[in-house]
Amino acid sequence: MADFRCVRIGDLLLAKGLVRASDLARAVADQPASGKRLCSLLVAHGALEYDDAARALGEQRGFPCALAKHLANRDTSVISLISAELGRVSHVLPIGRSSNGTLIVAARDPAPALRATLEKQLGAVTLVITPATRLEQLISAAYGDSPHDEFDIDLDSAVDLDPLPMSPPQADVDMLDPDSIRMALSDLDDERVSKDPTQSGLLQINAMASASSGGFRASGTNISGAFKLPPAAPTIDATKLALEHAATRDAASDLAMSFIAGRWRTGAIVVIREATAIGYRGHGIADLAELHLPLRLPSTIQRAIETKRLANSAPPSPAQDQLVRVMKSTAITAVPVVVADNAIATIAVGESILGAADTSAPAELGQLAQALGGAYDRIRRA
């Protein structure tokens, strides 16, 4: 049997004959506006059976999967074992126990890092994947809707920061100084499916941005002399304008990630929750859920929050090692995203696509973080 674990979910569905190419194209086109994942859209359109989606995700990512019947017959008595905050933020829901008593937790994005987090609180758990469309409804029914946008659930739990200056954050010069078990469920399953712009063509700047005065960088636009950005890479001005009109948090996040994907080899938006940095959106990252960094340990992300500015280095620590491994880069830059004077997220990126000669990258990263924070704040207040 072919190993599909490195295949994009849309390609896998086509290869297995589970969807028609026209239905897949429609779902891909609808993703930016809907903010939904590809399988969830296909299920909602009636183009893909829920159980087929669950099995495909499991085969793609290598975890057991929960089918519709498993969710329908879930054990509601175990729901309270996971807090409402953790359930909503990590998109997880306990659904029962295996024959040996191990707690079975359905997750939108199962991964070893998430399992480790749960096991610190609950002991041994078995993570299973299921499409987001039904799971998120069950999580909302079990734990209630978030009182605000996901980033704004509890601003008091974020790290307090002074407002960022209007000019882009300056580089942190000081830091540059030398100195399975057998399941009663399906045998398939999945890991974190990050919203990587390379996956199913998810991230597209909308028509408003492309028609703006900033527009897109056309192929051949010079940056730093002979260097060029990829064709159709959005400019920072177009992205900032688009963020001013983004209607939802997901739309704003996707706009930011689209810019990142055109400028850096890897990148992520990382949410700050309960003294932990948690991966939320990713570009060029195989397993976004591996971004589960305790802020009590030094890392470039922790440094960006602590110094209230762009950071590009950090002392050695397990958290920094994990960040380097997940980001596939030793040259990581991070900048905080601020809402209501609180750092609710950071943007972290690896090497620029243009290399070291891309001297404008730090300033534009700072502008992006400020514009994204402004969009989140506006959406939160709407």
Image: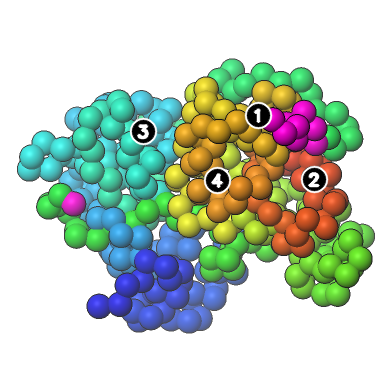
| Residue found at x 48% / y 81% | 21
Q: Secondary structure at mark 3?
A: helix
Residue 229: x, y in percent?
79, 67
Q: Is residue 93 magenta?
A: no
Residue 362 got which mark? 2
Ranked by sequence position, the earlier of labels 3 and 4 is: 3
Q: Secondary structure at mark 4?
A: helix
Ranked by sequence position, the earlier of labels 1 and 3 is: 3
Residue closest to the eye, 12 or 318: 318
Q: Secondary structure at mark 2?
A: helix
Q: Which residue is mark 4?
A: 324
Q: What amino acid is labelled 1 in the image?
A: Arg
How many residues crowd mark 3 within 10 Å: few (<14), some (14–19), many (20+)?
A: few
Ranked by sequence position, the earlier of labels 1 and 2 is: 1
- In the picture, which quadrant includes the C terminus? top right
Q: Which residue is mark 3?
A: 117
Q: Which residues are magenta?
A: 171-180
